[in-house]
């Protein structure tokens, strides 16, 4: 059939010319292979609001885009170990086996925040509930099951606590908030330390699991009688009810920036691997207003990588007073990093090149 | 009289004494490569998954399957699949139990009972249910469905049927196996109903009209002609739905609450194989943790394989009983 043959030939010729044109134009416009215009990171949801502020500011200053996904501290550690991101963010420092797996990695503390027990009790408003460490541990161990329990009543004289079952809520994903919370409970309660332990993901005796800070917040919002732990920036932004915790000095404090900063004074010298725990500061006039569930949060990078130079510049910028000031406000509640930690962070940063 | 079936004639020798057509060769080559690729892909996935689970298989062996444990804390690490296997079994079974009659009802309505104009509309709407992403259904489940079940349905079921262990005390937060069952039923409804609808449409008119002509009622006709004819296909559709329910991860992990135990109450929390993998894989802390999660995947893969083989067996045996051979009729 000559007609069909001719039209097919013409179509094929046109297609070949078009393809050739695309290839030529594309090759002419090709950019050089690896421009450091984007840094990819993943991990902690606690630092995510800070990076949401840092990213645009840094891009405006230097043109380098920061691309971040909040998948939880456990996910951040896994991602940087597998080198699927340029930097990982985690509120939990690397444990020995993780440090061995990510052998070329350093962890640098770049912000200071806290986790907050958050509740939904009908009739109680925010900051009205008072709890202490042993009671909180007993709630999450399943030993205290009702809000009208005498142990809770004793801490809250005059507060109308309803006869309502307690539903503890926790994170189902690998979370730095879980790490800080279980770190505190392990310090407070030897039962917790031996039965459950301290990690980004634990085997909870009781309670409902939610995915990410939003998942836990959804459970608390829709379940009367629930209590969970959420990072402080999230609590403030979403107007959730936060608890007054009794610290070791006997005072009931809220997770404000000065209270968190006070807890961070616990650090006298920073160990070589930058691993610090500032939960449950001891009884002392210096820590009389300290918030007992404070935590540093870390950025984890490989010492040498294709993006090492760009990463060092970004982290150095994040540690400067100007960048820290961007996140030290009543909305985000990241407290200023103590001088000794800042010095150690910058010293570790020199290893990245 | 035997019909001449040139495509299947066993005596035809394709290239004997004829010029080889490039088109035929290409067709055979490309189609054959695609088929081989499909088989190779399944084999590769199975091999990679078993390979990834090796540290956990080496440590626990087959005992992993009936061990109730899951603790990822360094120093206390221990892993076992029993509670998740139970969760998968119970959620899939009850989801199918809930969805099957509903799907049959929808299919029957659309093929036998609905006025012509309504058919198209209802069909489109039911199939649109399949287009809703799992994440969205999970979100709806924990924010809307869960509280409604917790406040209204579960207390009523517990007070009416509480003597049955299945209906224990209502859940605390609306996150429970029951919520997961309802979410899964909603997700497998479109598949089962659309396949059933196609099957019922394929029942020969002569058989249906013959039954009606003999004086049967509509229901007797459906029960006596439509169901037996479509029996094998319905079984396959149900098992397809079961496979979907077993593998659903994201929607289930948002509504099931989590927990490493086996409780018989539908209103307690729980976890399934797929949902545990979805929740923990990204943040897994150690090699053994990752390997154990992949081991859960191996078990899930094995379950899906068994379900698929069962479906094929049922379809084949029913087809054989009917005397229906490939390419002809009885």
Image (cartoon, coloured by chain):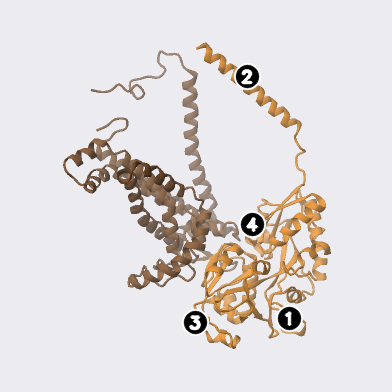
Chain colours: A orange, B brown
Q: Secondary structure at mark 2?
A: helix
Cα gap from disc 3 to disc 4, whole angstroms: 43 Å
**Chain under numbered label 2:** A
2 or 3: mark nearer the eye: 3
Q: Earlier in the sequence, mark 1 or mark 4?
A: 4
Q: Secondary structure at mark 4?
A: helix
Q: Is residue B68 visible?
A: no
Q: Position of residue B252 (x, y in %)?
A: 48, 58
Q: Earlier in the sequence, mark 3 or mark 1?
A: 3
Q: Which label is found at residue B120?
A: none
Using the image as rendered, state which of residue A223 and residue A191 is in the foreground.
Answer: A223
Are tags 3 and 1 found on a single chain? yes
Residue B274 in the figure: left or right of residue B122: right
What residue is shown with label 4? A78
Are tags 2 and 4 found on a single chain? yes
What residue is shown with label 3? A163
Residue A141 in the figure: left or right of residue B199: right
**Chain under numbered label 1:** A
Q: Is B315 placed above or below A129 here?
A: above
Q: Which label is found at residue A289?
A: 1
Q: Earlier in the sequence, mark 2 or mark 3?
A: 2
Whether label 3 touches label 1, CB < 8 Å: no
Cα gap from disc 1 to disc 4, whole angstroms: 36 Å
Q: Secondary structure at mark 1?
A: loop
Q: Earlier in the sequence, mark 2 or mark 4?
A: 2
Are tags 1 and 2 found on a single chain? yes
Residue drawn where x is 20% and y is 38% of the image: B210
Residue B205 in the figure: left or right of residue B273: left
Q: Earlier in the sequence, mark 3 or mark 4?
A: 4
Cα gap from disc 2 to disc 3, whole angstroms: 82 Å
Q: Secondary structure at mark 3?
A: loop
């Amino acid at each position: 059939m000559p007609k069909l043959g001719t039209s097919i030939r013409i179509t094929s010729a046109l297609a070949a010319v078009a393809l050739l044109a695309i290839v030529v134009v594309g090759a002419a416009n090709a950019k050089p292979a690896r421009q450091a215009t984007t840094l990819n990171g993943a991990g902690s949801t606690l630092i995510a609001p800070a990076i949401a502020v840092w990213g645009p500011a840094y891009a405006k200053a230097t043109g380098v885009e920061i691309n971040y996904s909040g998948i939880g501290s456990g996910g951040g550690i896994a991602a940087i170990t597998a080198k699927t991101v340029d930097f990982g963010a985690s509120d939990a420092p690397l444990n020995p086996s993780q440090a061995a797996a990510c052998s070329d990695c350093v962890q640098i503390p770049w912000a200071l925040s806290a986790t907050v027990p958050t509740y939904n009790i009908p009739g109680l408003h925010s900051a009205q509930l008072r709890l202490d460490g042993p009671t909180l541990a007993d709630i999450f161990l399943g030993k205290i099951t009702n809000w009208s329990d005498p142990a809770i009543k004793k801490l809250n004289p005059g507060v109308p606590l309803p006869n309502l079952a307690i539903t503890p809520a926790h994170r189902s994903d690998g979370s730095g908030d879980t790490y800080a919370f279980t770190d505190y409970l392990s310090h407070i309660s030897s039962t917790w330390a031996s039965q459950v332990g301290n990690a980004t993901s634990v085997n909870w005796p009781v309670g409902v699991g939610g995915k990410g800070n939003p998942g836990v917040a959804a459970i608390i919002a829709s379940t009367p009688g629930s209590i969970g732990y959420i990072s402080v920036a999230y609590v403030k932004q979403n107007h959730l009810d936060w608890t007054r915790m009794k610290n070791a000095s006997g005072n009931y404090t809220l997770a404000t920036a000065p209270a968190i900063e006070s807890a961070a004074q616990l650090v006298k010298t920073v160990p070589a691997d930058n691993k610090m725990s500032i939960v449950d500061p001891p009884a002392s006039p210096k820590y009389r207003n300290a918030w007992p569930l404070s935590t540093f949060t870390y950025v984890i990078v490989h010492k040498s990588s294709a993006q090492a130079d760009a990463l060092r510049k970004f982290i150095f910028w994040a540690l400067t007073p100007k960048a820290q000031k961007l996140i030290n406000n009543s909305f985000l509640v990241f407290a200023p990093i103590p001088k000794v930690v800042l010095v150690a962070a910058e010293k570790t940063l020199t290893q990245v090149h | 009289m035997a019909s001449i079936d040139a495509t299947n004639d066993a005596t035809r020798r394709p290239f004997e004494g004829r010029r080889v057509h490039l088109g035929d060769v290409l067709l055979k080559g490309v189609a054959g490569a695609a088929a081989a690729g499909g088989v190779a892909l399944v084999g590769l996935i199975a091999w990679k998954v078993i390979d990834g689970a090796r540290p956990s298989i080496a440590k626990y062996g087959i005992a992993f399957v009936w061990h109730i444990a899951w603790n990822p804390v360094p120093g206390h690490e221990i892993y076992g699949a029993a509670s998740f296997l139970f969760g998968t079994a119970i959620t899939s079974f009850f989801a199918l139990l809930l969805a099957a009659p509903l799907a049959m009802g929808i299919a029957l309505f659309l093929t036998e009972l609905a006025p012509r104009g309504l058919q198209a509309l209802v069909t489109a709407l039911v199939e649109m249910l399949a287009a809703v992403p799992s994440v969205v259904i999970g979100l709806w489940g924990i924010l809307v469905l869960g509280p409604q079940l917790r406040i209204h349905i579960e207390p009523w079921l517990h007070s009416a049927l509480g003597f049955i262990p299945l209906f224990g005390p209502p859940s605390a937060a609306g996150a429970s196996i029951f919520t997961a069952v309802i979410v899964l039923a909603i997700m497998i409804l479109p598949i089962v109903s659309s396949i059933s609808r196609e099957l019922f449409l394929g029942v020969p008119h002569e058989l249906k009209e013959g039954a009606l002509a003999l004086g049967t009622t509509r229901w007797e006709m459906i029960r006596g002609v439509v169901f037996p004819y479509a029996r094998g296909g319905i079984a396959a559709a149900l098992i397809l739905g079961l496979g979907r329910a077993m593998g659903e991860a994201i929607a289930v992990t948002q509504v099931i609450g989590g927990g490493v135990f086996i409780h018989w109450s539908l209103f307690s929390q729980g976890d399934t194989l797929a949902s545990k993998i979805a929740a923990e894989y990204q943040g897994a802390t150690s090699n053994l943790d990752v390997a154990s999660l992949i081991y859960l995947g191996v078990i899930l893969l094995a379950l899906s394989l068994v379900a698929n083989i069962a479906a094929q067996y049922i379809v084949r045996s029913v087809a054989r009983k009917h005397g229906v051979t490939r390419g002809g009729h009885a």
